[in-house]
Image: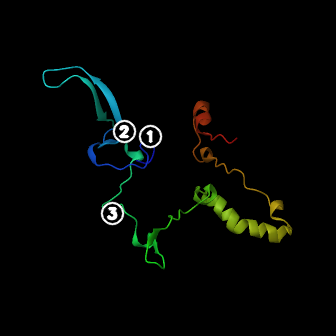
Amino acid sequence: MLSGRDKGRTGEVFEVHPAADRALVRGINMVRRHQKQTGAQEGGIISKESSIHLSNLAYVGRTANRRASDFKIHADGKKAALPRAREQRSMAETAYVPRLRAEYDKTIRSQLTEKFGYANVMQVPRLDKVCSTWALAKPSTTARRRRRRLPICR
């Protein structure tokens, strides 16, 4: 489990509902239900598994143990587990960068600095927004259609 009250626990997936993107995992996300007595089943309060969204599950695999490289052997021969190093990335590194902004940062900004002799990076103009007016390529017949096709830049 990746989130919720059973975060970090593992179990066997015994039923999957692909249409609803949910699964049942043995011993995880247990709920208590009041069940009425029937001819086939006994009544009372029963515990059963509730479904979990697939985005909250992760595949563990057969070897859920640590890898051999995650241990350190001391001089006395004892093994000690090393803390796993997690790769830390800032949002700026993982966020999507539009192609035009990347081109501006890579080439155009340096050309502007050379051409106008800016002493500081903060003096170079920023690229805030690019708006494409694609409605001009295909003129509309009515004013209503024209209003609908024009992009809104704010």
Which residue is denoted by mark 1 in the rendering?
5
Residue 103 image-quadrant placement: bottom right
Residues at badges 3 and 2 in contact (C-beta under 8 Å)? no
Residue 11 is left or right of residue 143, and the answer is: left
Residue 66 is left or right of residue 132, and the answer is: left
Q: Secondary structure at mark 3?
A: loop
Task: Measuring from the top left, give residue 122's x and y in whole percent.
Answer: 81, 60
At horizontal 69% and vertical 63% (from top left) the residue drawn is: 104
Classify 10 Å Cα crowding around label 2: few (below 14), some (14-19), many (20 and above).
some
The residue under label 2 is which amino acid type? Answer: Asn
Which residue is denoted by mark 2 in the rendering?
29
Which residue is denoted by mark 3 in the rendering?
63
Whichever of callouts 3 and 2 sits on the residue coming sooner in the sequence is 2
At horizontal 18% and vertical 24% (from top left) the residue drawn is: 42
Q: Nearer the viewer, residue 127 or 77?
A: 77
Q: Nearer the viewer, residue 48 or 120?
A: 48
In the picture shown, does residue 138 fall above or below 127? above
Task: Measuring from the top left, give residue 20's x and y in whole percent.
Answer: 33, 38
- The extreme bottom residue here reads 75
The residue under label 3 is which amino acid type? Answer: Thr
Whichever of callouts 3 and 1 sits on the residue coming sooner in the sequence is 1
Residues at badges 1 and 2 in contact (C-beta under 8 Å)? yes
